[in-house]
Amino acid sequence: MKKKKSKVKRIGYRQIFLIICAVFWCIFPFISRFIIKKIPEIETKFFSNAAGEIIDLLLFCKEVAIAGFAGAVLLYFIGERIFPDNIETLDRARFKRIRFPLIFIGVYFLFSILSFIFSDYKETAFWGANSEYEGLLAILSYSIVFVFALYYLKPGKQNSKALSSGKIFATAITVISIITGILTIIEIFYKPILEIPIIQDLISPSKYRELARSIKNENFIGQICLTFNNPGFLGGFCALLFPVTFAVSQEGKALKRWILTVMGAILILAVKWSDSKVAMIALAICFPLSVLFSFIHMERLNPETSGTIGINKDYVKTKRKNLIISFATVLVLGVGLIVLSGILPNYSSRIRPEGKPENSAVSTGGKYKLSKAEIKDGVLRLESGDKLLEVSVDKEIAKKCFADYYDSDFSECLIFSDGTNIIEGRTPAVLKATNIREEKQGFTFTDERYKDIKVCVERALLIFDFGYSGSVEFYIKEDGIKIFGQGSALLDEIPQPAVTGLEGIYSFATGRGYIWAQSLPIIKDSILVGGGHGTFAFRFRQNEIVGLLNTHGSCKYVVDRPHNWYLQIACSDGVIALLAVLALFIFYIIRFVKSLLAKKNRENNIELLDIGLFAGLIGFMLCGLINDSCITVNPLFWLFLGWALARQCDNPLFFKEKLD
């Protein structure tokens, strides 16, 4: 009598290792830890309080976690080669198949190292600036994560009794999607995750517990960001994860398919509440495209149309039916949840009426739109088209004012003119409150040319309200006017734009055009090597008030990143590193398209998972046009890219020898 074959998959030490890795990736996106950290002196100019300290919840701990994972993978790889009972030898044939991705990622990492070596800010370049914590350590970890996926997440052998890496990590995708979905519902309808007392106690050491209880989501009212530090990063995460989740759902049984369909709808809701327009666009393009590719793929497996042997036509018919039903269901549920979230009471609506943030800084009057602002020899010149307002200091009166500092009216030492004639007439006016100060009493001019300007003089502090959402502060000195720079430093001159002639693109993508245009000199200096990660703020020309006011409405911004992943690579690691990354992306895209279109697809050389990975990766690459790389999401991107390439490089379409 023949024994029945066991359906239980064999689990060896390699499978145990992969299961541990999969568990790590289920946890990684949600790792949080409350820390108070001293930062390098150069960063205190831009990012800290007076003590040179910052509070961090999500970034530093994630960099440490991903570095720990990378180190563990390296140790395991070495251990496989020296373990005495079962020494693992390198698969030379497979290394040959994956050589191009290894070369591309190697060039990227090599120039990251060179950029670090030649950086003037070594500590920041190693750890990354405290606003991102994505330094050389993170890039090294990304590279190892990519190679880990490329080497270990290869497709399983046909009819293998061992539990495949694909099954293990598909289960991890399911878990990540469920956790994200649950946290999204909590954050929308209850309160932000990091404002929940039990979570605050969990992520903070006892000595900081009271301080952790004061955490508030004040920067992103009306948006959610879960544990991703920024709503835009959450949007990018969902754009990456959602197509993969949908593909995994189509490979599972009915219960799993319906659970992941609901989770997919919640991921759409998360993108909506992240208010990430680029993520929504990425989903709108890539999700329908992935469904179309999946349907075409299934049609090519249909024995009635393709002549494929060994494929059950009823099985293919059921798969296509499930695909269409799931596609329609996830869209209907997603739209329904978005509508419900606007009707039902939610956390945002309990803080701000109709879920909209207050912005007392929004101007309701006219605007003196600055076209140029400069200080020359202590004289402030403010131009708006053909209008000019000059502000100078009467040195004798200023000297008397400083001698009796607290009882003097410093406005008496100021001389306002149009460059030729003194402007005398003034009437009382109120400077509107902003997000950093209260309403102020001041004056405006009776001269019609300057009716949109309001001025307040508080001792030696000179405040201008030009009608933008934010005001501009200057300081009166005996020798003239100074402007406040970063870190409250007094500057003798107002920095001028590094690039002119591109003002027309400044407002593109909510002011990103301004940053991109003014980043061009940094890219020019980074052709071979960049300045190191996290150093963008030190290399960008800060305090250029005209460009900042006309694009953001305030000049209080520290431009600490280019808000474009590709520009970020060029500035941090050099243009050659960027070309290597783009070559890696293009290599993958070409491989996938060839696999999808090849006639050998009838032999099932790609699966729905490959299509889901492709759609998610392309969506995230699109998000990279607007978003920076970030330690909260990009590690998962590199894992997915390595996984996708592992599957493509082991596709028989691209090599002659047979798989083991």
Image (cartoon, rainbow, N blue to C red):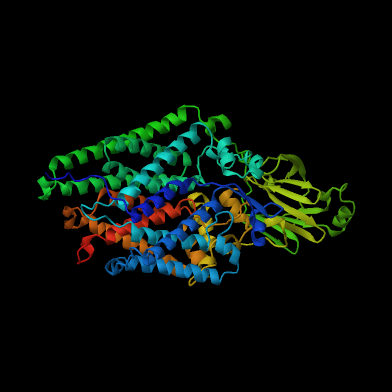
Q: Is residue 67 above or below residue 435?
A: below
Out of 55 and 323, give the one closest to the viewer: 55
Q: Position of residue 345 (x, y in %)?
A: 50, 27
Out of 577 and 390, give the one closest to the viewer: 577
Q: Looking at the image, which residue is at 74% across and 41% down?
A: 440
Which image quarter is the N terminus in? top left
Q: Position of residue 42 (x, y in %)?
A: 65, 62
Q: Position of residue 483 (x, y in %)?
A: 71, 57
Q: Position of residue 350 (x, y in %)?
A: 56, 29
Q: Is residue 457 above or below residue 355?
A: below
Out of 527 and 444, give the one closest to the viewer: 527
* Residue 429 seen in the figure: yes
Out of 436 and 481, give the one closest to the viewer: 436
The tally of labels here is: 0
* Image side of residue 361 versus residue 30, left or right: right
Q: Looking at the image, which residue is at 43% across and 40% down?
A: 179
Give residue 199's quadrant in the image. Answer: top right
* Residue 217 seen in the figure: no
Q: Looking at the image, which residue is at 42% across and 69% down?
A: 107
Q: Is residue 196 above or below residue 542?
A: above
* Image side of residue 556 versus residue 533, left or right: right
Q: Is residue 417 above or below residue 258?
A: below
Which image quarter is the C terminus in? bottom left
